[in-house]
Image (cartoon, rainbow, N blue to C red):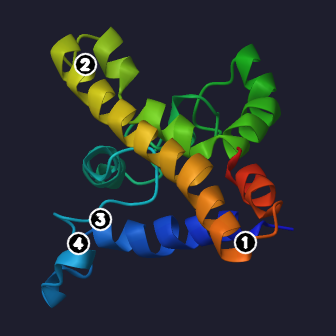
């Protein structure tokens, strides 16, 4: 069973945020759901997600060698990708990614492979890493501190914060 907090985050990010970051609702000129102002409930900053998803993924959607999202450089997702022994770990890696998905995407959006290949300057990596750290601190404060405290203030049960805190854990 999916926890309600998890379901809420999935719906906001995949059903709303994904479309907002594509600019699908920009025509409404509503600053709360505009692709240039939206910040989703996710560790990776919206600007990083827009770049790796809109610019990189949609230039070659689901085409091996063109789509950088295909397997996130970790999983073998297509038979056109040459098999390597490390791909035996796909089920384990997938299970880990499922649990820490937003954190994995934050690391992925740093484009470490491009840095190693010399295609992305280290200065850009430092800038991107700083924005991820700021966003991660905010997310942790909201998910692990503010939300459990608010739950306890509303319920006054003495135990509500523990339940909500456990939901915030990956």
State yes or no: discs 3 and 1 in contact (Cβ < 8 Å): no
State yes or no: discs 4 and 3 in contact (Cβ < 8 Å): yes
Cα separation, mark 4 vs mark 1, equals: 27 Å
Comes first in the chain, label 4 or label 2? 4
- Give the label, 2 or 1, closer to the camera: 1
Comes first in the chain, label 2 or label 3? 3
Q: Which residue is mark 4?
A: 23
Q: Which residue is mark 1?
A: 4
Q: Nearer the viewer, residue 10 or 149?
A: 149
Q: Secondary structure at mark 2?
A: helix
Disc 3 crowd, CA 10 A, few/some/many (<14, 14-19, 20+): many
Quarter of the picture holding the C terminus? top right
Q: Position of residue 56 (x, y in %)?
A: 30, 44
Q: Secondary structure at mark 1?
A: helix
Q: Position of residue 86 (x, y in %)?
A: 72, 17
Q: Which residue is mark 2?
A: 126
Disc 4 crowd, CA 10 A, few/some/many (<14, 14-19, 20+): some
Q: Which residue is mark 3?
A: 21
Tell whether 119 sits left or right of 80. Answer: left
């Amino acid at each position: 069973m999916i926890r309600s907090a998890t379901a809420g985050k999935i719906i906001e990010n995949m059903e709303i945020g994904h479309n907002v970051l594509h600019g699908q609702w920009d025509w409404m000129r509503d600053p709360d759901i505009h692709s240039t102002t939206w910040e989703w409930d996710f560790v990776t900053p919206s600007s990083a997600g827009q770049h790796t998803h809109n610019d990189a993924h949609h230039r070659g959607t689901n085409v091996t060698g063109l789509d950088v999202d295909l397997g996130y450089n970790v999983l073998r997702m297509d038979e056109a990708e040459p098999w390597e022994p490390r791909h035996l770990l796909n089920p384990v890696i997938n299970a880990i990614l499922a649990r820490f998905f937003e954190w994995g995407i934050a690391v992925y959006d740093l484009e470490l492979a491009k840095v190693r290949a010399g295609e992305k300057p280290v200065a850009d990596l430092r800038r991107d890493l700083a924005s991820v750290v700021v966003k991660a601190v905010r997310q942790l404060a909201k998910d692990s501190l503010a939300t459990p405290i608010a739950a306890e203030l509303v319920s006054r049960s003495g135990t509500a914060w523990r339940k909500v805190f456990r939901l915030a854990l990956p």
